[in-house]
Image (tube, grey):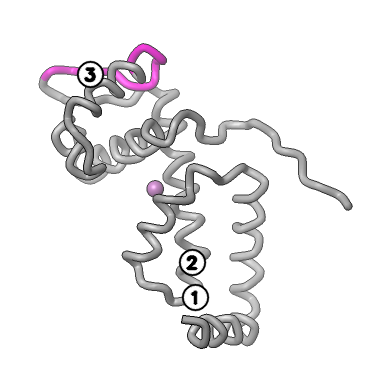
Amino acid sequence: MASVVSTKTDAPRGTRAQEDSLEQILSLIEKKGYARVVDIAKNLNIAQASVTGMIQRMDAEGLVSYEKYRGVILTSEGEKIARAIINRHESLAKFFKLFDLYDDTIYDDIEGIEHHMSPPTLATIQALTKELKKQPALLSRVKSKVLEAT
Ligand code: CO
């Protein structure tokens, strides 16, 4: 059986906590114009000291820098990775939204699984999303099976 070989392109990398932080930093910058440690900690529900430690490690890796008055800034490498993380989250959301699941459930579930998604698996879900959109009859059959099962 043919298999899809994993290619390491600009796929998100790093630990789960690091990915969550990069995702939050970019989303805060886009929403508010800046990302403060206190907001990152609040959104991720972790201690400010943990966020500070992570920022220092990511600073050493060239992904972010910290400025006293502007807060956390992404380097271009950090921003590239953060965008890939957000795109992956959005692709997964598009897939789950096809089935009319609750937005909160979708969000929480994606936060749990997104870090374990290889590029070929993500590409599979993206292709499946596109094809399912063209098959409303199949989609409603799946939805009624889901209703029966839950
Ligand atoms: Co996410």
Circle number at residue 66: 3
Label 3 secondary element: strand
Find disc 2 in the rendering and name its residue. Answer: 96
Residue farthest along the right direction in this orientation: 1
Find disc 1 in the rendering and name its residue. Answer: 99
Find residue 128 and report its image quarter. Answer: bottom right
Q: How many marks?
A: 3
Q: Residues within 10 Å of mark 1 (few under 14, many from 20)?
A: some
Does the magenta-highlighted stretch encompass residue 61? yes
Q: Which residues are magenta?
A: 59-68
Find residue 137 and report its image quarter. Answer: bottom right
- Amino acid carrying label 2: it is Phe
Label 1 secondary element: loop
* In this rendering, the label closer to the viewer, 3 or 1: 1
Q: Residue at x 30, y 40 (%)?
A: 24
Q: Residues within 10 Å of mark 3 (few under 14, many from 20)?
A: some
Q: Residues within 10 Å of mark 2 (few under 14, many from 20)?
A: many
- Amino acid carrying label 3: it is Tyr
Q: In this orientation, which residue lies closer to the viewer: 89 or 34?
A: 89
Q: Residue at x 22, y 38 (%)?
A: 46
Alpha carbon of mark 3 to alpha carbon of mark 2: how far?
36 Å
Image: 137 above or below 108 = below
| Percent coordinates x, y for residue 48 in the rendering | 17, 30
Give yes or no for contact between labels 2 and 1 (Cβ–Cβ under 8 Å). yes
Image: 133 above or below 23 = below
